[in-house]
Amino acid sequence: MNTINKIISIALLTFTINSYTHAMPQGPYVGGGIGGSILNNFSDTSKKNDGLQFAGRIFAGVNLMEWLGLELSYAKYGETEYTLDDTYDSVTFNYHLNTTSLVAKGYFPLDKEKKWNFYGLFGVAYVNANADMLFFDTKIANESSHAYSPTVGIGATYTFNQHLLTNIEYSYVNGKDGNSSHIAIPDSNLLTWNIAVVF
């Protein structure tokens, strides 16, 4: 599935959840999570040398209704090394990426007790990217890039009680092409296990 279709599909899934659903405790919440991230190749010639990397996130949000919430989050992705061209494998990039995202979340219960809930999310991410260029492991330059980009995701949450819940969440942020002034931003994938306290 291409990027646009992926974004449209999850957005429609999120916002067509009907109001008859009664899933999540209402009110503000805060939490954090740990997991793994994967950054895709950001050009036709780049070659990613790393796979899954350790990542983490913190977040705060509010469930406006039992089926609808808003969330602001900060995520730090794992450092990823790239070789830009097999011909010049002595030149590498150590790529760092973090995002600040604002999303809407739609919940749908998976059991009669409504302890387990599925959700979709859709919103916008401010992406901050930074890369150190290395020549034989010696830093010779640094490049950065910033952009707003759409983000989508899905997850499953378990509610222990009205004040404590946990979830597993996957999110995707669309990348951006580079130019003469800024490096490209790769498509990014984040999978985390999270815990949140509801007030």
Image: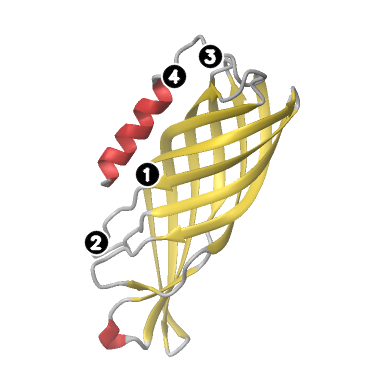
Q: Which residue is mark 4?
A: 17
Marks 1/2: CA–CA distance: 16 Å
Q: At 48% from the left edge and 35% from the top edge, which residue is drawn? A: 102
Q: x, y (%) of residue 150?
A: 36, 40
Tell which circle, 2 or 3, labels the residue nearer the N-terminal end. 3
Q: Secondary structure at mark 2?
A: loop
Q: Which residue is mark 2?
A: 179
Q: Secondary structure at mark 1?
A: strand
Give the amino acid at mark 4. Ile
Query: Which of the two residues, 152 or 199, is positioned nearer the viewer here?
Result: 152
Tell which circle, 1 or 2, labels the residue nearer the N-terminal end. 1
Query: Which of the two residues, 61 or 53, is positioned nearer the viewer here?
Result: 53
Tell which circle, 2 or 4, labels the residue nearer the N-terminal end. 4
Q: Which residue is mark 3?
A: 21
Q: Secondary structure at mark 4?
A: loop
Marks 1/4: CA–CA distance: 26 Å
Tell which circle, 1 or 4, labels the residue nearer the N-terminal end. 4
